[in-house]
């Protein structure tokens, strides 16, 4: 795994005062400190438990156990490195995403403070930082040029779920999962190619493919990222929203296990553990590699959930990113399975068929791919 640069997670977990009580966001503001430093202040009702995630041009402050609050908007001072601040909810955590004018380096510990309440103020998480000093590489290449050049090399395999004799789930209005997801995948292929990515599809028409064959296409194409597109169904027709799955040998919850059972049923393969990897893949997958692939997949899935949240796509109740023993994800290629929404929900079935909503899904996935740190 990468040790320096973008995409690292710095844990800043602090002892929690109250385990059960949820924290509340009070205010967000930026300012300029002596020496031209940018200061971000996040005020919360209880002592914050936080994690910082450094993106290429973003700094994300993840506050655990905190709901998003749209009534709190950031007060942005002029002359700072912060261009904008957005809130997104990822499971129980509030992600405060600061878009930066210039990249920053990891903030030293002594530039991060938690201040206790005083006067009119609640707890405040205070971060002070400056722009990263230009490296020789950055000096010879503008960031946008190097990003575009890097993007061209990356290979994405898109997998439209089901197909042919396997329709996937079917909405009450008769919409078939295999049809909707192929349409989304084709739009996504075009959009990603426009961004300079090399894109392959596991299927480009109404054909049936085994799950292991889909995974092995990702292997053969030496893909950097594998994205499997699906739509969901739930016995309860009121359940709606997207969710994103990564591979694990154990399901994260009962619902995730049911989903894995349903998706894996496509070719009734044995999904019990490591044995169901094809022999080639089994040899290639050292324990360390499995761990690395899992971490990269997790990073992609979290970024994808963020992009869906930002794109205003409704999230299924509960965690946005879940884990399940999904056969299609068994490979050495990092990736995720996106359940775009529920065909079992009448409103969402209608929505998923519309070109406008499919474009919205595509825009969010493109964003997630562009933000994914391929160099990890
Ligand atoms: Zn499916």
Image: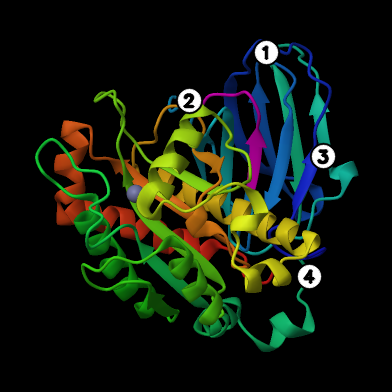
Give the Cα distance between marks 3 and 2.
23 Å
Label placed on residue 133: 4
* Mark 3 CB within 8 Å of ligand 1: no
Earlier sequence position, callout 1 versus callout 4: 1
Give the Cα distance between marks 4 and 3.
19 Å
Q: Which residue is mark 3?
A: 112
**Label 2 with label 4: CB-CB less than 8 Å:** no
Q: Is residue 4 magenta?
A: no
Picture quarter with the C terminus: bottom right
Earlier sequence position, callout 1 versus callout 3: 3
Measured along the vertical axis of the image, is residue 37 above or below residue 289? above
Earlier sequence position, callout 3 versus callout 2: 2
User: Which residue shows up at 25% across the image and 63% down it?
Assistant: 182
Q: Position of residue 238 (x, y in %)?
A: 26, 23
Q: Which residue is mark 1?
A: 120
Q: Quadrant of residue 136?
A: bottom right
Q: Position of residue 297 (x, y in %)?
A: 60, 56
* Mark 1 CB within 8 Å of ligand 1: no
User: Which residue shows up at 72% across the image and 39% down it?
Assistant: 51
Q: Which residues are magenta?
A: 60-67
User: Which residue shows up at 75% across the image and 64% down it?
Assistant: 289
Q: Is residue 61 magenta?
A: yes
Is residue 79 visible from the viewing direction of this image?
no
Q: Going by the picture, which residue comes out furthest to the left?
A: 173
Q: Which residue is mark 2?
A: 69
* Mark 2 CB within 8 Å of ligand 1: no
């Amino acid at each position: 795994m990468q040790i320096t640069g973008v995409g690292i997670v710095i844990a800043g977990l602090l002892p929690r005062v109250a385990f059960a009580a949820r924290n509340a966001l009070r205010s967000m503001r930026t300012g300029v400190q002596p020496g031209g430093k940018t200061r971000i202040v996040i005020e919360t009702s209880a002592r914050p438990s936080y994690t910082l995630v450094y993106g290429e041009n973003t700094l994300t402050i993840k506050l655990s156990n905190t709901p998003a609050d749209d009534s709190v908007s950031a007060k942005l001072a002029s002359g700072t490195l912060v261009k904008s601040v957005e809130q997104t909810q990822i499971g129980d955590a509030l992600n405060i995403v600061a878009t930066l004018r210039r990249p920053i380096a990891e903030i030293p510990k002594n530039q991060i403070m938690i201040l206790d309440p005083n006067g009119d103020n609640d707890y405040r998480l205070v971060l002070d930082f400056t722009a990263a000093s230009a490296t020789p590489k950055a000096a010879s290449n503008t960031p946008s040029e190097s990003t575009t050049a890097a993007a061209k090399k990356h290979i994405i395999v898109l997998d439209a779920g089901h197909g042919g004799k396997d329709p996937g789930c079917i909405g009450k209005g008769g919409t078939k999962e295999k049809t909707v997801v192929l349409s989304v995948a084709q739009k996504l292929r075009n959009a990603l190619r426009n961004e300079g990515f090399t894109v392959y599809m596991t299927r480009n028409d109404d054909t049936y493919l085994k799950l292991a064959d889909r995974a092995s296409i990702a292997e053969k194409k030496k893909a950097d990222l594998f994205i499997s597109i699906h739509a969901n169904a739930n016995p309860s027709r009121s359940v709606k929203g997207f969710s994103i799955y990564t591979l694990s040998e154990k399901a994260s919850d009962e619902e995730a296990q049911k989903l894995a059972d349903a998706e894996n049923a496509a070719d009734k393969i044995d999904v019990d553990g490591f044995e169901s990897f094809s022999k080639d893949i089994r040899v290639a997958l050292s324990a360390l590699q499995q761990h690395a692939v899992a971490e990269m997949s997790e990073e992609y899935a979290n970024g994808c959930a963020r992009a869906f949240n930002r794109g205003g796509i409704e999230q299924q109740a509960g965690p946005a990113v879940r884990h399940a023993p999904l056969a299609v994800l068994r490979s050495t290629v990092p990736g995720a399975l996106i359940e775009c929404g529920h065909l079992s929900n009448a409103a969402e079935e209608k929505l998923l068929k519309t070109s406008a909503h499919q474009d919205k899904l595509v825009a969010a996935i493109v964003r997630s791919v562009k933000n994914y740190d391929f160099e990890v």
